[in-house]
């Protein structure tokens, strides 16, 4: 249902999520405790790859905005696919670049004029 937390910022990553159906919001909690929605994702999008590739904690909270159906891929299988299939690695790299571009756009929009 709507409003369910799928992953929580700061948790360790153990799987990749693919959105088979539905929509989620990406929320980043700042050091001051503020929470900001920085992106939305929907059918066909995936998330969770950055924590799997870097062994860093989850860098955002993902919360459903509609009823969702997810497919998941455990970390070991995900890393195996990334290492052996160039097209999978290319898709993951593209998603990471998209995520970073959205975050950069969000950070630029947040800055107040001087």
Image: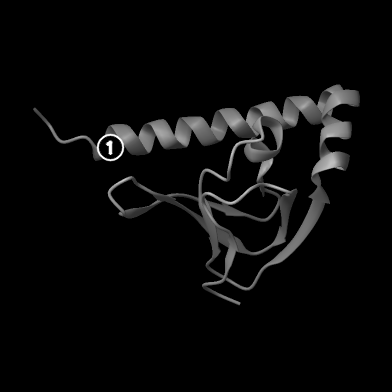
Q: Residue at x 55, y 33 (%)?
A: 98
| Quarter where residue 55 is shown | top right
Q: Residue at x 34, y 46 (%)?
A: 30
Outermost bottom residue: 1
- Give the left or right position of residue 75, taking residue 36 as reference: right
Quarter of the figure that contains the C terminus? top left
Outermost left residue: 114
- Give the left or right position of residue 44, taking residue 29 as reference: right
Quarter of the figure that contains the N terminus? bottom right
Colouring rule applied to residues? one colour
Q: Residue at x 27, y 37 (%)?
A: 109
The x, y position of residue 7, in whole percent, is 60, 57
Number of numbered discs on residues: 1
Q: In the image shown, does 42 or 54 lie closer to the viewer?
A: 54
- Give the left or right position of residue 70, taking residue 40 as reference: right
Q: Secondary structure at mark 1?
A: helix
Q: Which residue is mark 1?
A: 109
The x, y position of residue 89, in whole percent, is 78, 26
Query: From the viewer's perspective, is residue 70 above or below residue 66?
Result: above
| Other residues around mark 1 within 10 Å, as few (<14) / some (14–19) / many (≥20) | few
The x, y position of residue 66, in whole percent, is 57, 71
Q: Residue at x 33, y 35 (%)?
A: 107
Query: From the viewer's perspective, is residue 21 above or below residue 110?
Result: below
| Quarter where residue 76 is shown | top right
Query: From the viewer's perspective, is residue 37 above or below residue 31?
Result: below
Q: In the image shown, does 95 or 4 lie closer to the viewer?
A: 4
The x, y position of residue 37, in whole percent, is 40, 53
- Give the left or right position of residue 25, taking residue 19 as reference: left
């Amino acid at each position: 249902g709507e409003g369910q937390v799928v992953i929580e910022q700061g948790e360790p990553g153990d799987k990749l999520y693919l959105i088979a159906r539905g929509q989620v919001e990406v929320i980043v909690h700042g050091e001051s405790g503020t929470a900001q929605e920085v992106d939305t994702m929907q059918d066909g999008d995936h998330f969770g790859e950055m924590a799997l590739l870097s062994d860093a904690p989850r860098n955002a909270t993902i919360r459903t905005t509609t009823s969702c159906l997810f497919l998941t891929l455990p970390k070991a299988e995900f890393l195996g696919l990334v290492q052996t299939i160039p097209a999978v690695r290319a898709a993951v790299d593209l998603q990471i670049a998209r995520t970073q571009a959205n975050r950069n756009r969000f950070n630029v929009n947040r800055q107040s004029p001087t």
